[in-house]
Amino acid sequence: MIPAPAAGVAKRHKRPIAEERLESLFNTESISALLNHNDDALRKSDLSAGYFVAEQSFGNLVPQLRPWREWLGNRGFTFELTYKGESMANVGGGLSKGVDYVHDLRVSMLFDLGKLFGLDGWFVHGIVMNREGRQVGWDHVGERNVLLTEVWSIHGPAAARLADLYAEKSFFHHRVNINIGRIALTHTYGTSVLLCTFMMQCSAPMAIREPPGWSVYPKTSWGGTVRFRPTRDLTLRTGIYKIGPKAQDNTGWAWGSETTTGIQTPIELTWEPFFGPRKLAGHYKLGFGHDTSAYPDLIGDIPPAYRAIVHAHRQKPRDTFYIEADQMVYRKHGEHQMAGGYLLAGFIHNTPSISTFADEFYFGASLLGLIPHRPYDRFGVMYSYYQMSPRLTYGQALRQMAGLPMGDFVTAPQTHSAVLEAYYGIPVTPGLVLTPEFEYMMRPGENSVIPNAMLVGLKVIANL
């Protein structure tokens, strides 16, 4: 029998972008038992899986549709129509002054197969999206590796791209949850609502998103994840996914034309403690992914003058290791996990010789209600540092010394770059959030040739 919600807790309806609530395999805590007693009230009243939602605008702009939504939901179909638009202007430094706009118009759908066909406990998730626009980093900053807006597609525009399409089922009285189908890994691993309040870190840090083995919207992979809680404060998720080049299949519908290069086997352990009498929530993640695809040495073409003494490494698979942490430092306006201010940090390491980003680290804060009489506004600031592959740098330096082109859009050997980002999120009305953005890009192009760039912009999230 599935446990009933705690007394006084409103029943939550499953949303198109949320996973099922998991019950623990063992009714105990791990080391959290040393920190707090009787913390189950918060843990049971707050859907921790909702912490992995990509973005939230809390409500809908057209509440008049609620009766129709409820009528459809009672019959097995739930949907959300979300618009996300991002305009960013380079106002100083970089290559040139100018503005670029991108948007993501998405329909998220949930089919309850129990209500539709009598398959109790089975759900099908689907996302169809339209993405248009240009990347300000490419056009005006001179940055081709670090994306300076969240909404961008290496595939180019597609009128209606199929993204997620997967089935979900929980077993053993909601103690084990599986997802299987076409899934974007970076909305399952290495992500959080907090990261997605930042433009550059959503849906996961750049060093996780960039390698082909980690599919990121709108790219999805065939595979599946199993998720369970060994104890009430620990969540383990792992899976297996087919891997192919990211630039294939512009629409998401041409499954038969995809090339398979290997498989990705991610695993992530999350510890979710509560600290102190205010029950300040924390999320501490340790993750690893092994991509069996064979990737070449990033040294690239070796000039003839150096081929006798310099040799490319053999192709090898890629490993990714990451550790991410965020900790609530004060609580305001509620008992849910986003009701307060957080400090957060992370580190990502990829196999250096075959990964564009060998390392990334970031740290920052996401703070709620700093301005009086604006209790639900959120301010965020983050510094992120990107270390390029040493083999990539070495190969470019060899070609520079030989007087040969170093590569497309490369003005000098690429070593590292950094970005300072700040935002201020304003919930204008239920279903609409406006977020002014500021970015300071240090060493565009990962060298010192292009001047540091200053950008300002606006992100809009609207749920119809």
Image (cartoon, rainbow, N blue to C red):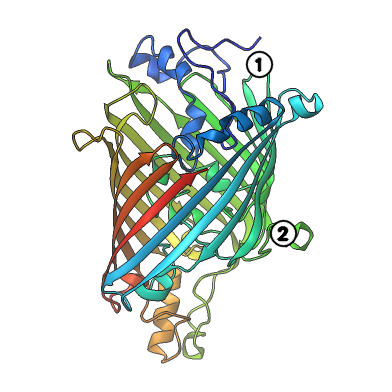
> Which label sits in the foreground, 1 or 2?
1
Closer to the camera, 4 or 417? Answer: 4
User: Would residue 204 appear left or right of 275 to someone viewing this image?
Assistant: right
- Residue 156 percent location from the top left of the image: 58, 67
Quote the CA–CA distance across marks 1 and 2.
Answer: 36 Å
Vertical placement of residue 252 versus 428, above or below = below
User: Would residue 328 appear left or right of 406 to someone viewing this image?
Assistant: left
Q: Quadrant of the N terminus?
A: top right
Query: Is any atom of residue 433 visible in this view?
Result: yes
Closer to the camera, 14 or 293? Answer: 14
Label 1 sits on what residue type? His
Label 2 sits on what residue type? Thr
Residue under label 1: 173
Question: What residue is shown at x 38% (from left), y 88% (from top)?
Answer: 401
Vertical placement of residue 459 versus 306, above or below = above
Vertical placement of residue 304 versus 48, above or below = below
Vertical placement of residue 215 versus 147, above or below = above
Q: Earlier in the sequence, mark 1 or mark 2?
A: 1
